[in-house]
Each structure stands twice: as C-alpha cells, then as structure tokens.
C-alpha cells in the first residue's frame, strides 16, 4: 500500500513548478497544533509553509489534515525544494560515474535517480529537509500572527516563526511520520531471530537517518571488538595455569554477586599484566579502526562534505542581524570570541562547581556513614540500626536532585552559549551532561581505587554494578516497554489498514517523543569505562559486556521502531563528541590500570620477593604508564583516520572545487 | 640601476604572447653548466626551457649568458607562465576588494597589480616559479640528449630532465640570482644598528621567500617570548628574599663557567616551583600564540590555501605512470600504503637502531671512563693519566662518525620513502635528523638527570653548555665568515657596478650554496630544550638565551645576505615539522621538570621537615605532572590556532569554492 495516497490529493497545495508535479504526495511531517487554535492562525501557518522562498516562505506542500478537530497540518516537500536543500546541506549523492559527489542543483541532471525523490534522498533526509525549511522560516519584518492576542503574537523581524509558535503553545510538536510498510520490513530484517549477525545499517540510515545509524553501527562495531578481550579474559580465567584455580573461585563468587571475602587477586601477575596491557592498547586500536569505519560509512551515506557552517543557523541562534562576512547573506551574527568567553568564563566554572558538588556528596556520604556506624557500634539500638540507612537515602536523594538541576542548567547554559550550528550545540550540550554523568558513575569507583586503595571492595562493586545494572537496564529497557506495549497497547495496534488516514496520524501523535540517544551512548560509555578503567581487576568484564551488547542491539532496535514517534535525524559525518569521550577514556585507562596493578597484592608480593622497594616499584609503574601512553599516541597517529580510498575520494572532491573556483569569474 | 637591463635584450627568447612582451627581462635563475658541455647539449637544454608547455617545454625565457666559456644559461619567466604557476601553486593574492583570494588565471584581471609582475609576485616567488617549471620538465617519450655519449644520455619517458642532467654532471647547479640593489636595501633595514627592535619580515618574505621569512619570524617571536621567563629568572635569582643570597652565589659561580661545588639549589623551594610551573605553562602559551601569529603571516603572504597536493610531484618522485585518481592527470603514481609500510617497517626501525647506537656510545663512554679512572687511581702513572683522555676522544670520534653515517642514511631513506610533495619530503627528512641531533644533545643531560640523579653536575653541565656553545657558535657563525669575507674576500667585492654582467653572475656562482635552515632551527630547538627541560635547575637560562638570540638574529641575517648564494624558497604556510618538535618538547619538559623538582635537595629537605614519605612525595609529583599535562592540553585546545579574522577569511574562501563547485556544470 502506498500510504501517502490515503491523504486526498486535492487538499494538497498545487505546485506551479512543472518538474515537481506529481499525482501523489508523500506526507512527511506532522505539525500538531493546540486544540484551541483558531482557523485564522492555522490558515496563516499554512500560508507561510506554502509561500515560495522568494516571499520568505518555506516552499513546502501543506495539507490541512481534514480531521474533525482541525489541529493537524501535514507537510510534504516538492522536488525542487528537496533538491535545493540537499545542496544547502552539502550532501553527497551518487554521480553518474558511480562516485559520490557533492550535490549541485545546477548540475542535478548528472546525478543518479534525480527524478525519483524516493530513491534519491533517504526517508530521513526528506523529512529533515522539511524540518530544515520549517526552522528556517523567519518573519521578514515585524508582524502580528493572526488569531493570537495582540500582546503576545508579535514577531520581531528575523525571528524564527516556529520557535515563536512553540513558545506560544500554538504548535505542540513537529515530528516526522512513520511509514508503517517500510518500518515493518526494516524491523523484520533488524531484530528478528533470522538476523543474528549484523544489522541492516543502510536501511537504518535510510529510514532513521545518520545519528541513529551511527549509533547502531558503533554498537555493532564495538560488540565485535569485544570478542578479543572476552576471549582473553576467558583464557586467563579458566584455562591458563598459574592463577587458574583461584580465579575460577573468584569468578564464581562474583557470579553470585556476593563474592567471597577474597585476598586472591584473580589471575597470576603475568596474566594480570597481559590483560591490562592488552586492554590499554586494544582500546586505541579499536577507536582508530572505528574512525576508519565511520569515515567509510560517512562516504557511503553522503555526509563526507557537509556544509552546515554555510547553511542556515539553528533556530535558537540569535544575534544582531547583519551580512555574514563568509556567505554575504543576511543572518544573525554573534562574535565567536564572545561565545568562547561565555564557555570559558561561565560554563566551565559552573560545570566544575557541579562536579565539586558531586565530590562533596560522596565525601558527605562517607563521613555520614562513618558517623552513623560509630553511633550504632557504641549504642546499638533499633533507632541507630535504622539510622544506618539514612546516609545512603540522603545521598541517593542528593544525587537525584543534583542531577535534575544540572540537566536543566546544562541545557540553558548551552542555549545561552548561542551556537550557530546544531552540531556544535549538540556537542557542547552532550559534553556537559556526559562529564557529569560520567563523574557520577565513576567517582565512587575512583574513590575506592585511589583513596581507599581497597581492591577487593572495588572488584565487588564492579561485579555487582556490571551484573545489577545490566539486569536492571535490560528489564527497564525491554520488559517494561514490552508489557506496556502488549497490555496497555496503543490505539495504533487496533487500527486496520483501511481506517481513515487521520486516525493513523493521530495514533502516531499519541506516541511519546523519542528521548534521544544520549542515555544509550552513556550506557555504552560507562560500560566501556568499567572495561577499560578497571578491567585488570575483573577479567570477565568483557564477556559480560559482550553478552549484554548482543541483547542491547535488539532491545534498542525494538524501542526505536515500536515505542516512540520517529525522531528527526540530521545528516552527520561521525559520532561527534562521543568519539572524543571514548578516546579520552582510553587514555585515562592507562593511568588507572597502572595504578591498580601497583596496588594489587600479587604485584606487591612479587616486588617484595624480587627485593624492589615500593619507591622503585612506583617509579617502574610510572615508566610503564608513560611508555604506554606514548605507544597509544603513536598508534593513534600511525593508523590513518580514513582508509586510503576515502582520502582519494575526498581529495578528488577538493580538487574539483579548487578547479571550479579557478574557472569561475566573480 | 635596473640590473636586468645589463643582459642584452636581443639574446633573450622572443615571446609570442602579446601580454608578456616587455622591453626588459629580469634574469631570475642561473643554470651553471659543466665547463665541458658541448654547444649541442646547451642548445638542446635551452630549447626545452623555451618550448611552449603544450610541447612539453617549460615555457620560460632563456638567455645563453654570452660568457666566453658558454657554461651559463640565465632563465626568466614570462607573465603568462608566472600567472599560470601561481594558480598551480594555489597562492593567494590581493583581490580587487582588498582581501586575499586564491589566484585564478581565469579571473586574473580582478587581482591587484596583475600587470606588474614585480609587484604582483615576490622576488622569491618569481624565482620559485622558474624552479618549479624546470623541475616539471619531463621527457615526453624515451629520447636521447644531444651531445652526451649514447650509453648515458638516454631519458626514459616521463623522466625528470633536470634531475637526469644533474646526475650526468651536465648541470652543476641551478640557483636564483641575487639582486644587489634590493639586497643592499634589505640588509640595511635588517641588521643595521638603526633597527634594533623588530625585523623587516615582509621584505624578507619578498626577497628570500617563505621558509626563510618563517624562520626569522619565529626567531623574532621567540626572542620576545623569552622576556617574561628572563625577568622571572632575574627576579627569583637576585631580588626575592629567601634563596636570594645563595642563588647569587650560584649564579656568579656559573658565570665563571666553573661553578663552586655547591649543595645549594638555586632559589627557595617556592621560587623553584614558581619557575618550573611558569616555564611549563609558558611553553604551551608561546607555541599556541606562535601558531596564531604564523597563520596571520601565512594569510598576509598568501600561503593559506596552498595546493601542493594537486600540483606537480617533486622531481625525485617516481612510480608507475598513470592517471591520478584525484586530478586525472598523467603522472607517476605510488600507493600511499606502500610508502607507509616503508616508513613503518624500515625507516622507523633504522632510526631507532641509530638512537640505540647513541645510547650505546654513552654507556660505553661512561664505563670506559670508570675503568680508566679506576686504573689511574690504582696505578697513577703518566700513562694512565694520558689514558684518562682516551674515552672522551673515542666518544667524540664515535659521535662524529655516527652522525655522518646517519645523515647519509636519513637522506637516502627519505628519498626511498618516495614522497610526492616536497613539504612531505622535507618534514620526514627533518624529523629523522632532528630526532637524532636532539638525542645526541640531550642524552647525556638526561643520563645525568634521570640515572645519575646528580643535580649539581647537571647545573654545571647546563651552564657550561649554554655559555660555551653560545660562545663557540657565535664565533663560528659570525667571526669566521666575517674574517673570510673581509680578508679572503670574494671576487664580488672588487666588482664595480659597470663591470660586465657576466662577471657579476660568475661571482655569485662562486659563492657557496646556502646550507639551509636546519642547523639554525636545531640550535633554537636545543636552546629551547635547555630552557624548558632543565630551567628549574638553572633559572638564568632564559636571560642567557635572550642575549644570545638578539645577536643570533643579526648574525643569521648577515650570513644569509652576504655569504651564500640566494636559496630557493618554496611558499610555505608554517614551520612544518619544527612546530611539532617545539610542542612535543613542551610536553616532555613537564616530565623532566617534575622529576628534577623531586630530586632537588631543597624539596627533599622540605618533605622531611613536613613528614612526607619519599613515596608520598613521588605520588604528589606524579599528580602534579598529570595535572600540568592536562592543563597544557586544555590550553593548547582552548587557544584557537588561528585568529578569528583569519578563520572567517578561510571559511570565506571555502564557501566560495563550494559555491563555484555547485554552479559548475561538469
């Protein structure tokens, strides 16, 4: 079934451009208005959406929705608009010679499939084009929005129309529409039992777009990358002579999540060392190989040459309106140094303050616990026994409240920093939240490792974190949504294919918004942290993570396909700031592993037997740390970030644009 | 006097192009042939130089020199050739709106001064264009060079003609000609007593070109940057209470280059720390600011947008001839992975081997010395007293022989790596030699600091190195050349302005070739190493270096102006690998300074008084080291590498080339 034939053709905008005329229009994006919006306002919004670009409109196709309440607008895009924005975004598309080339509207007929928008652009791209055009809608001069009280409905010149409408509550949400047929076929090839190995990455990119596709590609890559450390962990724990028998005891103990009070330290000293050194070098090699993989994907998906810098600024961006010195177009200008000052003098100190509060919380928790335990030991009544739980409860409460405040602060700080590009905004926001989440997760472990220097406790904590958090997250991520889906069941389920299209739209509108990939990424990063920072303490980490990831892929896929509205997804060339986070973690891991090795009782014994002073052992550990860091740096420098063939393609594009520049008369 | 009128006009090639016709031709480059070259060969060479590009020639103007021996060819370039190569090289030139823009031959009339090549291109650029064209001269098909024995004079298809001619000994040298008038006025404004502050950098760039101008800009910048640490050093040594009096004693002792046997350690602990931390952060800030300065210079000098990658490969580059996948032009192709394999599997191990031999030499020297001293102590004859000098002598001999072998090996390894671009070749060669020289200079100091842990000896060594090497280098660099120049005097001195032009040319040909900036840079780098690696041991280092640099600028200027042939200088955008070397040194300095602080008797005393165990002091030092390295990384990340206005200009150029690409029909 071509779902878009269901919205009656005659209600769509008529296109004047001959090349865009079509007997069917694909509904791409739904604008959900508030129920009390006046017809005058709705009409005005539709007129702005439909107006040609020269008159300051978005030049899109609009459909009034034809529902009883009249609170929907369905939006689509004509071929010309799609192609124009494709050029603006700097997407690469297959050229007639089979290579990818930066799309040029002027030269459009040399690109493959340019007559069939369904083939030429991915579903995610077409929908992103609509979002881009809606976001770019700005008031041409100061004007009043019809049907809104005079006091509120004034648009300043160059103000973003949709931002204003959302602020006023007129527009409740703008979201891309699912295409049930395609979604079902994607879901089938993605998380059905038949496809155990690998995921349909190209189809994911086609349907959900770059950000989602990059997440799943990374998850896939990372899961495969876990195989060598998992094998090594198994080998060292179960097969190797030496610490073998003891390690098995330790591993079993931890499998029950209540490890024995053990003074053994897992595998033998040499196994220990091998594991640590391997995991430190492994992390760099994996990230470098991932960069190469990422750049191949980015080439394949046409995002190697994005020109976000030169495109429209994000809607939240504000500044004095003027001519951009770069593109010579009229747009808000905001000096870069001012943004940097805001980041450096306000954002960074505020983030550091919050990190300080996290540390304060931990210190408070420990001193509180010590106090309460002292009290209980000296008095020992029921009351003091109850008091034992108080510090934990207060700490949990404190962490939650702090986390909530911080997430608000981080968002508004990033807004206030006023980034021009969406990707810069995302990266700065992600970096802020990421740092905090990471600190929250690892501060306790670092405290145990570096201050308490209590390795058995660290192992206990790590094992229970790995097992408990995995169980909990799998439950919340799979079971709960599945049950909700099954029993409380959305209205969509009951819809028949031949129900009116409006009901299908309304059922999508009823789904919750996709919460974004942040929590998914942070879960991976925290896992990766357990693995790389503390792996030498607990060699089976990689095995547990591998098991976890295999299910994680499927549950994430199920979630994004079934439980939420489809998210908008900007074309992206890489994972952004997450890439950096993983790499930094790799370097921190060298420090923590060297330190943990130094602390381990086995190494201490070994030193005493060998007659090393503790000072000399420390010096040796520092030497090893520095050498490993240098090797990691050399590795990451020596492994090129993109395969040779991508480099050649990229240089070819650069050469062509140089040639074009030289042949152009200004 | 316009020196180029002196070569008779009618002997120059006649130019067919109407725009290039001129009544005077500027002689740019001299080709010095062997004395026994047959007229047929000379005629053939001139014909290749003069042939139009379409016939595989260099399309330059040639002048047979008109000397009695007939062993000279003077070469110049017509306007069209100059402009065409300017585009090939990707030079930026002032556009009619005053901004710099990548030069485009097609749009040439929109650029300023395009009718006057003397204004439009710098002297160095015009000469480099000639070199570029001569280097690009390749045999179109297998052919025989007239006048050369049949067995030797066969050129393969696509073989570089001038490389072959030099190999055959037909061409002895190709060098750019000095312009006495301009040189004199440059010299006057450069190293005369009137211009104590600052150097005429633009004129240096105009006359000597980018590589030389960047060296002197860096020297200038670095000298100014030495002022703060020099002031701090003076302050800590002479003015601050605490370690003041003692430090003065130490400083005076070292000023005599025979320091007293002192167990004092310079300034007080806190002064010590301040000095060390300051110098560590200073080095990063200086290098970041230099990058900004460098990018401004590169914009001003039109090298922001070089397209070396797309231009002709360097003459030594070889490979199977084919169509480049990037430019689609016929040229030798050599796969990148093969080059990387050669670097990784051969060059790196060989370099490491040589570094190992250096270490072996030092170990041998020390053990030899210990043996000889033992022998002398136990026997104490004249013979053993003489033997005391043997290890030093052998070591000096060993170092020299090793250095000579290494420099040959480094050059041929880099040739064998087969780099396509001249800059890549230079960077790889420089990196190799640099690493070795640096190791040679610092291995002994590191040995004293890290293994012997003997701070007084380190101070002694450092002070004497600073003073002795400066005295020696100033002598060799200034006095010797000056004396040579004055007494043995080149023939140029005696020439009158109205002597035949041929004699002027011959006198330039008699000058030695400029040895390149390598030794100058390495001198700076070694100095910088003394300063940053060991400065906390000897706080007056910066003062001595400052004094040295002030004279260094002048002696270097004198040398390059008076004592050598003019060097060719490629347009460059930065210092290349030297930049990286200075930055890496900055990071190594953190490690060495933290270690030295830990070793210093004052800090040891302080720890004992404070009741710190040596293990805890070590832990603290590691913490400080890590924190400082992280601060340095954040600093170098937070200080943008180019000023905002340059970034905007660069993005403007990128935007224009993107637009041009989009508007172009393929």
Image (cartoon, coloured by chain):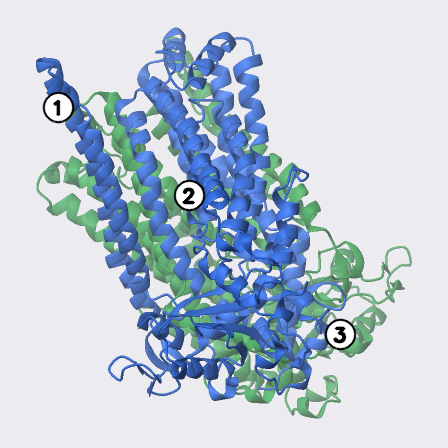
Chain colours: A green, B blue
Closer to the camera, B224 or B486?
B486
Q: Which residue is mark 1?
A: B371
x 58%, y 13%: residue: B239
Left-right relation of B30 to A336: left
Q: Residues within 10 Å of mark 1 (few under 14, many from 20)?
A: some
Q: What's the CA distance linking mark 3 and mark 1?
A: 91 Å
Are dots 3 and 1 in contact, CB under 8 Å? no
Residue drawn at (40%, 79%), measured in percent from left and top?
Answer: B331
Does residue A386 appear in this view? yes
Mark-to-mark CA distance, 1 and 2: 34 Å
Of the residues tagged 2 and 3, which is closer to the observer? 2
Q: Secondary structure at mark 2?
A: helix
Q: Is residue B651 above or below residue A586?
A: below
Q: Quadrant of residue A219?
A: bottom left
Image height of A2 relative to A184, above or below = below
Same chain for mark 2 and mark 3? The answer is no
Is the C terminus of chain B in the top left, top right, bottom left or bottom right quadrant?
A: bottom right
Viewer-proximal residue among A503 and A619: A619
Residue at mark 2: chain: B
Q: Are marks 1 and 2 on the same chain?
A: yes
Q: Label 3 near label 2: C-beta < 8 Å?
A: no
Q: Which mark is residue A49?
A: 3
Q: Is residue A112 above or below residue B290?
A: below
**Image mark 3: chain:** A
Q: Provide the secondary structure element on which disc 3 rests.
A: helix
Is residue A531 shown to the viewer in this render?
A: no
Distance from disc 2 to disc 3, alpha carbons, whole Å, reads 65 Å
Residue that badge 2 annotates: B522
In x, y percent, where is residue B310? 49, 72
Q: Chain of mark 1?
A: B
């Amino acid at each position: 079934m071509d779902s878009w034939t269901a919205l009656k053709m005659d209600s769509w905008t008529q296109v004047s451009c001959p090349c865009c005329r079509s007997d069917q229009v694909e509904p791409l994006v739904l604008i959900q208005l508030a129920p009390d919006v006046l017809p005058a306002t709705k009409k005005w919004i539709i007129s702005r959406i439909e107006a040609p670009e020269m008159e300051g409109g978005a030049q899109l196709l609009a459909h009034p929705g034809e529902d009883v309440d009249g609170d929907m607008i369905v939006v689509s895009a004509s071929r010309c608009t799609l192609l124009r924005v494709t050029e603006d975004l700097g997407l690469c598309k297959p050229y007639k010679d089979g290579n990818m080339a930066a799309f040029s509207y002027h030269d459009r007929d040399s690109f493959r499939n340019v007559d069939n928008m369904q083939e030429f652009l991915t579903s995610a791209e077409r929908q992103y084009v609509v979002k881009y055009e809606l976001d770019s809608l700005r008031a041409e001069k100061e004007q009043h929005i019809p049907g809104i009280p005079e006091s509120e409905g004034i648009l300043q010149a160059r103000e973003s129309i949709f931002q204003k409408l959302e602020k006023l509550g007129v527009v409740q949400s703008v979201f891309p529409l699912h295409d049930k047929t395609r979604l079902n076929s994607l879901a089938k090839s993605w998380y059905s039992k038949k496809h155990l190995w690998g995921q349909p990455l190209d189809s994911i990119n086609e349907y959900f777009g770059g950000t989602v596709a990059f997440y799943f590609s990374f998850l896939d890559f990372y899961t495969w990358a876990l195989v060598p450390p998992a094998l090594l962990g198994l080998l060292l724990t179960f097969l190797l002579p030496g610490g073998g028998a003891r390690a098995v005891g330790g591993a079993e103990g931890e499998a029950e999540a209540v490890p024995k009070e053990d003074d053994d330290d897992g595998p033998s000293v040499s196994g220990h060392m091998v594991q640590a050194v391997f995991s430190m070098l492994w992390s760099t090699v994996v990230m470098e190989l991932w960069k190469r993989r990422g750049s191949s994907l980015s080439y394949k998906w046409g995002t190697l040459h994005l020109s976000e810098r030169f495109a429209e600024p994000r809607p939240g961006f504000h500044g004095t309106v003027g001519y951009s010195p770069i593109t010579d177009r009229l747009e808000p200008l905001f000096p870069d140094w001012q943004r940097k000052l805001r980041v450096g003098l306000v954002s960074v100190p505020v983030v550091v303050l919050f990190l300080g509060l996290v540390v304060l919380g931990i210190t408070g928790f420990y001193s509180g616990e010590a106090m309460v335990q002292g009290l209980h030991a000296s008095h020992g009544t029921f009351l003091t026994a109850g008091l034992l739980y108080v510090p934990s409860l207060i700490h949990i409460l404190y962490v939650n409240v702090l986390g909530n405040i911080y997430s608000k602060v981080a968002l508004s700080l990033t807004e206030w920093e006023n980034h021009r590009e969406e990707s810069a905004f995302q990266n700065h926001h992600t970096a802020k939240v990421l740092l905090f989440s990471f600190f929250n997760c690892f501060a306790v472990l670092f405290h145990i490792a570096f201050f308490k220097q209590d390795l058995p406790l660290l192992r206990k904590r790590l094992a229970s974190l790995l097992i408990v958090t995995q169980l909990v997250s799998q439950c919340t991520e799979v079971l709960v949504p599945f049950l909700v889906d099954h029993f409380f069941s959305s209205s969509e389920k009951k819809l028949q294919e031949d129900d009116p299209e409006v009901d299908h739209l309304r059922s999508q509108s009823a789904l919750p918004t996709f919460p974004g990939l942040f929590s998914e990424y942070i879960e991976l990063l925290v896992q990766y942290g357990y693995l790389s920072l503390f792996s030498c303490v607990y060699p089976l980490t990689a095995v547990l993570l591998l098991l976890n990831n295999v299910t994680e892929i499927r549950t994430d896929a199920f979630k994004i396909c079934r439980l939420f509205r489809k998210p908008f997804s900007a074309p992206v060339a890489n994972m952004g700031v997450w890439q950096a986070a993983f790499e930094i973690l790799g370097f921190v891991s060298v420090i923590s592993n060297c330190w943990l090795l130094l602390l381990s009782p086995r190494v201490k014994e070994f030193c005493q037997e060998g007659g090393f002073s503790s000072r000399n052992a420390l010096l040796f550990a520092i030497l090893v740390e520095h050498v490993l860091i240098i090797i990691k740096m050399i590795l990451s420098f020596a492994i090129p970030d993109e395969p040779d063939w991508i480099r050649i393609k990229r240089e070819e594009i650069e050469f062509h644009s140089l040639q074009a520049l030289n042949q152009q008369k200004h």
